[in-house]
Amino acid sequence: MESPCSLTSLSGTFARYFFYAFLAGAMALCITWEALNTPSAYLFGEDSLLEALQVAALFFTMVCAWTAGHRDPSPNPVATMLVGAAAMAGIREFDFCLDRYLFDGGWQVLVCFTALLTAASVYRDRETLLDSLHGFAGKPSFGLMVGGFVTVFVFSRLFGRQVLWRGIMGDGYMPVVKTAVEEGTELLGYTLIFIGSLEFLRESRCASVVYNAIDHVR
């Protein structure tokens, strides 16, 4: 007979992943809504709902990683790296706005500045970096984030190439289709990274509970 504790844990796992599936489906429905309600000339542009969803996923990834880092009773350079990476990706998504209203190449300057701050913070906790990376590599959050990273920076870049879609559509090539596929795939990747950050936050909470319990026993 299964113990109530194991059944509760299993149901909690199913509930979490059902929520993640719902989140991914909601993203797809938002893209559909935009396609049906936006003039084709403005469809999936830099200020579109699709781009806003990408930025939102990165923002909440940054929030989750920051919260996880502050919950951890010991220095967590992995959390710092995740916050920095999400911030840099978010700045990159605002490149058109920064180039227009700040100065040309403004986003590169901000990305470099963020990278330097992140590197300095990680270097400060360098003694725990290898242990943190080793622990992170064995967690579900790591697999989800790596999957998201590969989706955004490898698959979407190759799958969204113009030469591919010209080959598929021939003389009927429509740039908006290529953009929708590339940006939609990017959104899927960012959603996976966000889901990974939720798992990272949950793992840090569990680690904090265990640490406090051990400390109490001592």
Image: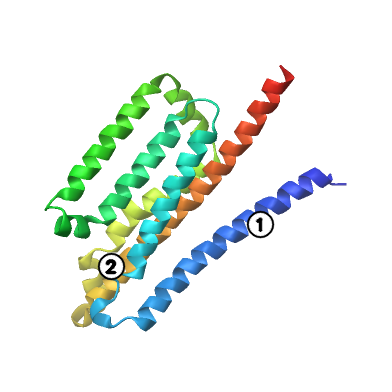
Q: Secondary structure at mark 1?
A: helix
Locate residue 41, reporting x and y percent.
23, 80
- Residue annotated with mark 1: 15
Vertical relation: 52 (above or below) 210: below
The residue at which mark 2 appears reads as 47
> Looking at numbered disc 2 in the image, what kind of residue is underneath it?
Asp
Determine the residue positioned at 36% across, 67% down.
50
Residue pictured at 19% horizontal, 46% vertical: 108
Q: For numbered disc 2, what is the local secondary structure?
A: loop
The outermost residue toward the right is 1
Amino acid carrying label 1: it is Ala
The answer to whether 185 is drawn above or below residue 218 in the figure is below
Work out which residue is located at the far front of the displayed protein and give it.
Answer: 101
Residue furthest to the top: 218
**Residue 25 located left or right of residue 97:** right
Q: Position of residue 34 (x, y in %)?
A: 38, 76
